[in-house]
Amino acid sequence: VLAGNTNHYDGVIAAFEALDLAVVPVFASGLDCRPAINEFLVDNGSCTVDALVSLTGFSLVGGPAYNDSEAATELLRQLNVPYVSALALEFQSIDQWRAGERGLLPLETMMMVAIPELDGATGTMIYGGRDDAKGPDLQSDPERAGALAARVAAMVSLRKQSKRARKLAVVLYDFPPNSGSTGSAAYLSVFRSLFNVLRALAADGYDVEVPDSVEALRSRILEGNAATFGTPANVCARVTTDCHVAREAHLAEIEAQWGAAPGRLQTDGQSLLVLGEQFGSVFVGVQPAFGYEGDPMKLMFQQGLAPTHAFSAFYQYIRHDFDADALLHFGMHGAMEFMPGKQVGMSGDCWPERLVGSLPHVYLYAANNPSEAAIAKRRANATTVSYITPMVAKAGLYKDLQTLKDALEQLRANAAPAKCKAVLNEVQALAVQLELVASEDPLWTDPEQVAITLTAKLLELENALIPHGLHVLGETPPQLALEQMLEAAAAADGEAVLPEGVIAHIAAGASSSDVEAQRAGLGEAEQALYEKLLTMRSGLVENAEIPALLRALDAQFIAPVAGGDLIRNAEILPTGRNVHGFDPTRLPSTSAISEGHRQAHTLLESASNSVGTLPRRLAMVLWGTDNLKNEGVGIAEAMALLGTRPRFDSYGRLAGAELISLEELGRPRVDVVVTVSGIFRDLLPRQMQLLAEAACLCALADEPVAQNPIRDMALRCAQTLDVSLEVAALRVFGNDESAYGANVNMMVDNGMWQSEEELGAMFMQRRCFAYGQNGVPTPQAQLLEALLAEVDITFQNLDSLELGITTLDHYVDSLGGISRAVENARGDAVPALVGDYTQGEGAVRTLTDQVALEGRTRMLNPSWYESMLEHGYEGVHQIEAHFTNMLGWSATTSQVDPWIYSELSKTYLLDTAMRNRLAALNPLASVKMAQRMLEANERNYWSPDADTLEALRQAGDALEDQLEGVHDSLGTPSEAYA
Ligand code: BEZ
Ligand code: MG
């Protein structure tokens, strides 16, 4: 302003004015924008503008120097208008950015996107930067400034519009397609939640038609005329091919990949089918499959690819035919925000922006996933509204496990040798039948030891925490679930123990006089725990989510919140806030560094037990979510294993890596081959460089190779591969820029593979890109293969209770994928280890044990599956996903014990009553369950006796007959769906 070089601001102001928005420009002379805002944008305590746009690109309080996000949030809450932080490029020219695949550079992302998000900014956009042709001053970019203005204008008009006139598009998902998963989202009971949301919208003044019941809602969306069209849901509208061709601006790109319009997916030949149903002024649509056709590996998440005709037409329909005023993605998560384009710092040519345009976008998102929430915010302009993950409870014991516990108690109580022998026999029979120990185990000669060992095993099973069912928006968790959740949180909290009955009292909503009386007798630590549980309960019963959703749809400010797990982090309550990650400039945090150090130690102990000696080389998987939630424990652990640590500058910001001397380390360094998810790469680019630097420091250290396997390997690889030592020291591998996923999970899901080797090969193909200290990936398949050929152990940490390794196919994709790639490279399998840090001190288990633990405490546990089945259709889908993941573990690691398959078959398929229940609730998913068990047999992951196999085949046939019954009544599926 003082120097008069305000071109970049002027351009933005002109863009706003072109859309008839009145602009009040305010200038902060210091680092703190509050004084300027309070002076010019607040009158008598109320905000005088309809939206606040920051063009600084930095934090609102602190600018580039520091960030007081609490103060910023406080101010923004008072203003209660949408807050958009926009930026001018600092470290590259506009042309460089436009031409690049990545978008923003790591430092720009960290300072100008991630930090403003801590204040509550969302949908951060670029509006300008340097134009080399025009000299050193910043310029606005007319296209970006126009897009920014259009977005802000849409939010302002949403604020001003009457709710009665407002049209809302709600998007549900269907993934994987054709598997009974239409209308599913992570942790969420979708139709019940949607029903509650529709009611709330009606009460809030929207012109919405609310069906009579959840069942009626589900049936109108999933059934309706689906029979006539042979589609997985009601056909609500058709976009004719002519219309699609006329208005699709990017038709050529779509046709290049998917053929001439209308393509072959979700079409009747003349038009593209829009699935869903309209309820007054609310359209509920089902997101089309994101598309594999013919070649299932031809997935979306890649440069140069395009969504299908149906996918793009769906969003065109929402914007131009239905003419929505706001868009709501209903739960975590769909495919739109993952569509091809830059990672962050979108251009108008990035598919997410092409699809959403300037439509105000609200995204219901799980409170525990800051990393994927960031993708929705940054790539698709979403304001996330968090929802809580399901309550957790102790798994408890059931059936024979309970009988065994009783028998063990008898064993302890009975001294008489004759009686003791009889009970011991019973214990042995039960324990062997339950596959807890082998019948020939030497244990059996020592009854006392038997009791101790088995009691410990049962205790682990009984106390394991498991998620309870699915979350319902707008409903308070049932009393018992609340109580169990508070108990779990109390146990996770530390030493303090509350007297019997107190937690139940808190859960029930103790009156203030009760509270006073109860608290009076408690010690200091107990009082603190008491307070914490009281606060947690009130957060859990507050039901803040739907009100927050309504406010977001009014374009009010949605306050930010760090993503986290309820059990460790009650600050995620109340939910209904805009999720962000930990401040990436400070990650790994001090506490994460010490925890990472501890975990490295625990891992090396377990790994030494598994392989007999201290391992020299590990393959470790890192995910973004975990590290953004736990402040970078996994990153710190990898660094500790290498014998390195992070350095920070005097402002506490991450500056680089340094070696710990071998003397201080007191053991040899351990080589760590890190493979990261695409999400980790996108969100933690600086930490990618940090890890690369750490490995390189090790390789360059002049130390004996016996003590330094990184150097040993780098020296050898430099020679055999004829590369520099720096290249041979690359240890951070992932997808190519802008690609996500190893696709191993996709292969497992669609079953289109012959030998397990193909799964490892796919992993190699997808994740062989090495990221060096400059942050730029290069394909290094030979190097990765050479490293994997000498890996002793593969492992990944679990951080969220809600996500077991059998819950989410991405674990199969990452840990399973790398394990199979190691087996390909070595010629034999190595142990896969799982660091389960979801509870207490945590434990490192073999994959076999972890799978068995989850099998016993979840899949085979009536309290787990009943809590899923309560949610009907979606519950069955969730159970089925576990079947597929189990098969995925067998396929990638061969470390699943066969008994799990027989027990799963018995529990779900060979039990007629259960099978009928499943079939009635979700026929497609139940058929898939039977097919998975048969596939497991065909692939030799278990070999049931002939009778069992026959019974399973019949069960599968019975389920398919029922499905055909359904299909018959639905009519013949059209060609497009065959
Ligand atoms: C991640 O946070 O890195 C991640 C999340 C979900 C699936 C895969 C990776
Ligand atoms: Mg995901």
Image (cartoon, rainbow, N blue to C red):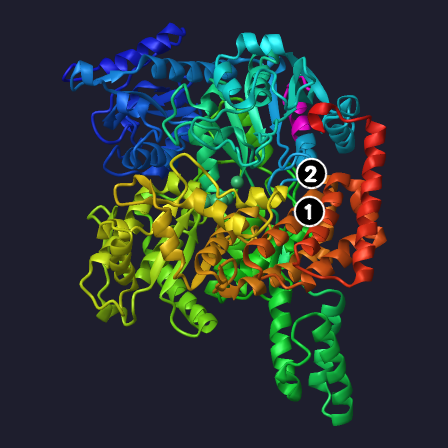
Magenta residues span 197-208
Q: Residue at x 37, y 51 (%)?
A: 784
* 703 horizontally vs 734: left or right: left
Q: Which mark is residue 142?
A: none
Q: Quadrant of residue 88?
A: top left
Q: Amino acid at mark 2?
A: Ser
**Of pointers 1 and 2, the one earlier in the residue sequence:** 2
List x then y, in percent, for residue 127: 32, 19
Q: Residue at x 42, y 45 (%)?
A: 767
Of the 4 image quadrants, the one containing the N terminus is: top left
Of the 4 image quadrants, the one containing the C terminus is: top right
Residue 800 lies, with reference to residue 438, above or below; the image says: above
**Residue in front for this viewpoint, 276 or 8:** 276
Q: Is residue 201 magenta?
A: yes
Q: Secondary structure at mark 1?
A: helix
Q: Residue at x 32, y 34 (%)?
A: 109
**Residue in front for this viewpoint, 60 or 645:** 645
Is disc 2 surrounded by few (<14), some (14 to 19) or many (20+) residues within 10 Å? many
User: Do residues under tags 1 and 2 come within 8 Å of each other at their CB atoms?
Assistant: yes
Which residue in the structure is indicated by mark 2? 179
